[in-house]
Image (cartoon, grey):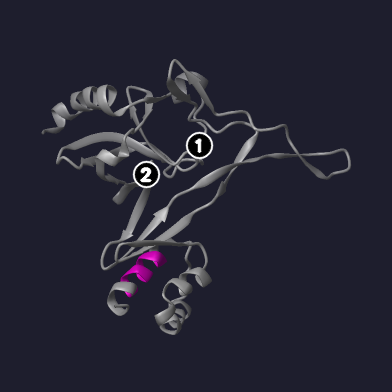
Amino acid sequence: MTKNIISVTITRFWLLSLMTSILTDLHGQTGSDRPLPHFLFPDFTKGIIKMKDGRTLSAVLDYNMVDEEMVFEQKKVYMVLDKPEEIDTVYLQNRRFIPVEKAFYEVIVKGNVSLYIQHKARYVPVSSSTAYGMKSPTAPLTSVLTVSSGNQMRSVELPDNVTISPATVYWVRTGNEMHKFTTEKQLLKIFSGSEDDLKKFIKESKIDLKTREDLIKLGNYFNEVIK
């Protein structure tokens, strides 16, 4: 399939068989160019969607970390990739993402021991100052999801009364088992048989679990040393 006919294929395929959720127009609704901190990348960019049946599609994509959904843009309409179980891999910004239930995990290292990032975030109410200079919560969050005619309509802009709080989770696959961790202590527990060597490597290499480049080093170490 060539790039010249991929756009037509996406229109027919996603709108007729894969898409049930439609997002509202980002700029048409608000006329705003505000950044979207709840999305993984600063801009929607062209990516490749590899289907499990062998087809390859091209789309302009970004990842919503709050809703944990891959979103594509076509003619200023923003839509959610539905039925991720039919997708093998999404290639975006020189990174790989695989579907896990409705979410997409980034593949950091693939091998006997594989390492993944679950890019995740949550909305947090913005506090306002009281007369005495103390902070108090604002009114409850305005819903960012409404239902209309059976379709989920979302705004892709950040609501005015919230900010974004990261809630990233990391995953290690050993054999057929997935183990999650967010701290070094949890990671060491997963590899309890190699705990001393792993702890030494993390210290000597100054590994920061929150840094993607360091996670790649960690994943490579797993596959070189841990059997």
Query: Callout 2, which amino acid?
Result: Glu
State how far apart marks 1 and 2 are (Cα). Answer: 28 Å
Q: Quadrant of residue 52?
A: top left
Can the viewer see residue 31?
no
Which dot marks residue 35?
A: 1
Question: Secondary structure of the magenta portion, mostly?
Answer: helix
Characterize the local packing of mark 1: few (<14), some (14-19) or many (20 or more) Cα atoms within 10 angstroms.
few
Percent coordinates x, y for residue 173 in the rendering: 34, 63
Q: Nearer the viewer, residue 80 or 92?
A: 80
Please state which of residues 199 and 46 is positioned toward the viewer in this rendering: 199
Look at 36% across and 70% down and name the residue there.
Answer: 217
Q: Percent from the top left, x then y, of residue 90?
A: 28, 44
Left or right of 59 in this view: 67: right
Residue drawn at 84 percent across, 44 percent down: 133
Query: Please, what is the three-letter code of the amino acid marked with disc 1?
Result: Pro
Mark seen at residue 101: 2
Magenta-colored span: 214-221
Q: Is residue 122 magenta?
A: no
Whether 2 is drawn above or below 8: the answer is below
Q: Residue furthest front?
A: 176
Binning the other alpha carbons within 10 Å of mark 2 as few (below 14), some (14 to 19) or many (20 upward) gives few
Q: Dot 2: what SS?
A: loop
Instruction: Residue at 51%, 41% (x, y): give it.
Output: 37
